[in-house]
Image (tube, grey):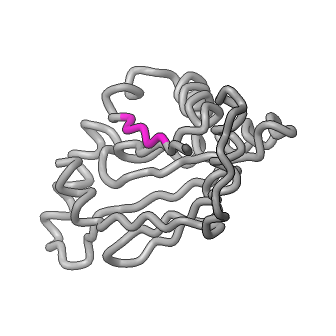
């Protein structure tokens, strides 16, 4: 049996942490083969630092990360609404949007469309990591397709974060 773990990290969990501790926390979770749904987004400098740390830690067991940031739709906002949302971001932090971070050994591709997110995973990687944690008595099964597709609606995500 294979298991895929999705972990939600709220903005409150990381807002008091320094940039270095935020990056360490997220990277440690990804190294545990978890796909992270982070409320809001990292600063651009933190994203760059996360990628830099990831590159320095790549080895046979850790293949890197896949990252995607999704922002709520703002095309039809009036000027005053845009100013209000920027003001709220300054006071409360970057809570708008959603950041998805996961291990490259599991996530093969993240596609972002206007009304959905497509997350393509590699079955072989999840089965291999599950076997590494099992007792080794796996039953042989018919091969499954090599990639799965998880589709999440941005409206569903926005409603769950609100």
User: With 27 as the anchor, is 115 left or right in this view?
Assistant: left
- At x 26%, y 70%, the residue is 74
Would you say residue 125 sits in the magenta stretch? no
Q: Residue 63 location in percent, x, y?
A: 77, 46
Main SS, magenta region, reads strand
Q: Is residue 11 above or below residue 148?
A: above
Residue that protrudes farthest toward the right in the picture: 60
Residue at 76 percent of width and 39 percent of height: 62
Q: Quadrant of the rendered structure where residue 27 is? A: top right
Q: Which of 74 and 69 is in front in this view?
A: 69
Q: Is 107 drawn above or below residue 8 in the view shown?
A: below
Q: Is residue 162 above or below residue 120?
A: above
Q: Say which of 33 and 81 sits in front.
A: 33
Q: Which segment is the magenta one?
A: 5-9
If the image is split into quadrants, where does the N terminus sit?
top right
> What is the total number of numbered labels drawn onto the structure image?
0
Left or right of 91 on screen, residue 60? right
On the image, the x and y values in percent for residue 128 come to: 71, 44
At which x and y percent is residue 34? 54, 39
**Front one among 151 and 76:** 151
Rendering coords of residue 123 (x, y %): 63, 57
Residue drawn where x is 52% and y is 58% of the image = 68
Image-based side of 142 in relation to 157, left or right: right
């Amino acid at each position: 049996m294979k298991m895929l773990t999705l972990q939600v990290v709220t903005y409150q969990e990381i807002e008091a942490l320094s940039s270095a501790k935020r990056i360490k926390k997220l990277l440690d979770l990804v190294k545990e083969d978890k796909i992270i749904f982070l409320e809001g987004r990292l600063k651009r400098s933190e994203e760059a630092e996360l990628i830099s740390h990831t590159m320095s830690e790549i080895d046979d067991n850790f293949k890197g990360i896949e990252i995607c940031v999704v922002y709520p739709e703002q095309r039809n906002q009036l000027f005053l609404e845009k100013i209000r949302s920027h003001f709220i971001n300054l006071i409360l932090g970057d809570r708008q949007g959603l950041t998805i971070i996961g291990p490259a050994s599991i996530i093969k591709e993240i596609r972002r469309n206007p009304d959905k997110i497509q997350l393509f995973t590699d079955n072989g990687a999840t089965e291999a990591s599950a076997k590494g944690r099992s007792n080794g008595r796996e039953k042989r099964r018919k091969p499954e397709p090599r990639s799965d597709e998880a589709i999440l609606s941005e409206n569903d995500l926005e409603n769950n974060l609100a």
